[in-house]
Each structure stands twice: as structure tokens, then as C-alpha cells.
Image (tube, helix red, strand yellow):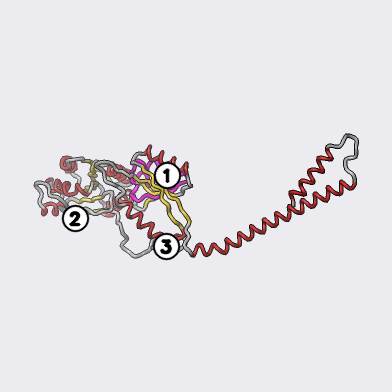
Amino acid sequence: MVEQEAAAFRRSMRQRRSRPPGSQLLTGQEDYSLRGSYRRIRGLQQEQEMARFGRVQEVLKLLLMVWPVLVLAGVRHPLPVLWMMPVNSGTGMENLTVGVVPAMRMALQDLERQAAPLGNYEVRLQLLDSQCDPAKALKALFDTLWVGPRYLLMLGGVCPPVTALIARSLPALSLLQVSFVAPPPDLSNRKWHRHLFSTVPSVRAANMAVVKLLQRYRWRRIGVFTQDRPGLTEMRKDLIRQLLKTDIQLAASESFSEDPCSSLKKLKDEDVRIIIGQFEDGSVTEVFCCAYRLNLFGPRYQWILTAEGPSGWRLGWQPSGCSVTSLLMAAEGSFRVQIKQFSSTNTPGVSGR
């Protein structure tokens, strides 16, 4: 109806423009007819707009009626999340995804059983293969963000070089990263890395505990004995930085890669009595065997062991020249500073669990 009235109105206007110059543009009857056509067109358009508005209201009412049913039926909102991991660790390296994938699967299943609001979301993981290469990891991240959808959260952080580079890019990308490994000491500064979080405390926390222990017993002169490993080297540097803020004297700092005995002898030559040991669990037996042969044990010496991981250490294989009794005698009275995997109380955490 509106189209017919509009067509008639356009024909009348064309006839008006085609009249010769000097003639009367519109007669009274034509003017009245055109004004009437215009009013009818506007009236019909308003009626159509009201009809469309009424249909929109009906759709909204229907959605409001159906929405509670959809929620009760278990409809979950998709939540895209990035997951950065080295898919193939390479020959001779530990497959880092072996222990993480089952834990991730358990977490997703646990999330499905949660009540609202957590249970209303379905986490959809987008795997990014970092290959433990900062350049390849950054390219994979940019390519994924370009394709979309929009991501707000990224899980991962196994490789320290990749984590260090990505952490500097997080603010510009409006991303938060949650790591399930302890971040290096240089990444644990909340002032500079506000977008990086970890479910495991940094090794910096273990160094802080060591400093407090030294201050508690008023041990003012110490030595540091570190194994040559990237993570342990960073741990030693962080400990030295913390010691500079106290009145504790660092008498000597030695490191070893293969044979710990030669480096340990240098600590003995410096007459170091308080020894901070930073080495892997597999080297504990060898180190204490050297300590026994160099007589660096007993009531005149104190060993304080720290390491990256939360696992405890144990005396394993027997090196030549050291019996089980000798190892136990050398390790007697030593302290072990480690991060606990589980709480010793039943107090719920921030998740309420």
C-alpha cells in the first residue's frame, strides 16, 4: 500500500516539473491531492514502524521466557582461552605435556560440575606450540590473535625464555597469563609484570625464607654453593641481591658442573661454616659424599639446601668411597627450604575450595 501511494506521489511530481514555464504549477485540487497523498504515505510508514516495533517486543518477550529454560538446560557460554606449550620437546628432552594434559583435562571436567557462575562457561582451549623458541612463540601468538576470536587469558609458561618475552608483551595485547610453573626471579616483580600470575610461588620466595632463617639464628658469614644450571644460576643471583640488603657477609660463592669436590674445597679453604646449597635433587648424594670426605659436616657446619622444585630430596646412588652411613652422617642436621605442594591446614583458598 505504501509503495502504491509513493508511486502515485512521484508521478504527480514529475508532471509538475514537466509543465511549460509560466504556467500555474499546481491547481488547488492538485495541491490538495498531493498533500493528502503525502499524509497517507507518512501514516502508512508509521503504521509499519509500529508493527515492526511490536514484533521486536514479541521477540524480546519470547527470549525472556526461553532464557531461564536455556540456563536450566545447561547451555554454557564459550570462553576462548590460549594455551601455550611446547608440543614436541625434542630428542633427549622431557615431554613437558605428558603431566600437564591429564591435569588440564581433570580441571575442565571439574569446571563442568561447578555451580553458577563458573558452571555457566565452557572453556575452549586454543593450543599454541611455543617450541621453547621466543621468536616462534611470539609469531604464533600474534597470528592467533589476528585470526580471533578475542582472547583475555593465556595459560602456559613452561620455557623461561618464552615467558620472559611474552610477559613484556601482555599489557599491549590486553592479555593475562597464568603460569603453572615457578617464574624466574626476574619475572616475580609485580611492579613490572602485573599481567603475569603463577599458581606456584617463585624461587624468590625460597631465597627470602633463607635470609629470614639466617637472620633468625644470627649467622653473619656464609658461602653459596650452586650447580651450573640456568634456573639455579638465576636463583643464586637473586639470593646475592637479597643478601646485599642485609648485614650478612657473603664470604665465598662457588659453582660446579660435573665434579663438586674441587669447588667445595674452596669453601673449606675460606673457612665457610654456613653453606647455602643450590643444586638439583640428583646431585645431593654426590655433594654430601664430597662433604663427608672433606669433613664439612658436624656441629661446626650448617647446610641449608634450596632448589627450584617443590619435591623433597633423598640420598640415592652411592658414589665410590661413601657408604650409606657416611652419607647420612654428612646430611645429618641439614635444613631443606622448599615450596609445599599442599597446605597443612583445611582453610579454603580464594576459590573457596
Callout 1 amino acid:
Trp
Residue under pointer 1:
192
Name the residue furthest top. Answer: 21
Residue under pointer 2:
333
State how far apart marks 3 and 2 are (Cα). 46 Å
**Does the magenta run of residues contain 170?**
yes
Q: In this view, does 344 lie above or below 229?
A: below
- Residue at position x 20%, y 45% in the image: 272
Q: Local crowd at mark 1 within 10 Å, few (<14), some, or many (≥20)?
A: few
Depth check, front residue: 239 or 175: 175
State how far apart marks 1 and 2 are (Cα). 39 Å
Of the residues under marks 1 and 2, which one precedes in the sequence?
A: 1
Depth check, front residue: 90 or 308: 90
Could you tell me which secondary element the residue under label 1 belongs to?
Answer: loop
> In the image, which is nearer the foreground, mark 3 or mark 2?
3
- The answer to whether 249 appears left or right of 292 in the picture is right
Mark 1–mark 2 contact, CB under 8 Å?
Answer: no
The span picked out in magenta is 158-187
**Does the magenta run of residues contain 300?**
no
Could you tell me which secondary element the residue under label 2 belongs to?
Answer: loop
Could you tell me which secondary element the residue under label 3 belongs to?
Answer: loop
- The answer to whether 29 appears left or right of 229 in the picture is right
State how far apart marks 1 and 3 are (Cα). 34 Å
> In the image, which is nearer the foreground, mark 1 or mark 2?
1
* Percent of width and height locating residue 285: 16, 49
> In the image, which is nearer the foreground, mark 1 or mark 3?
3
Mark carried by residue 114: 3
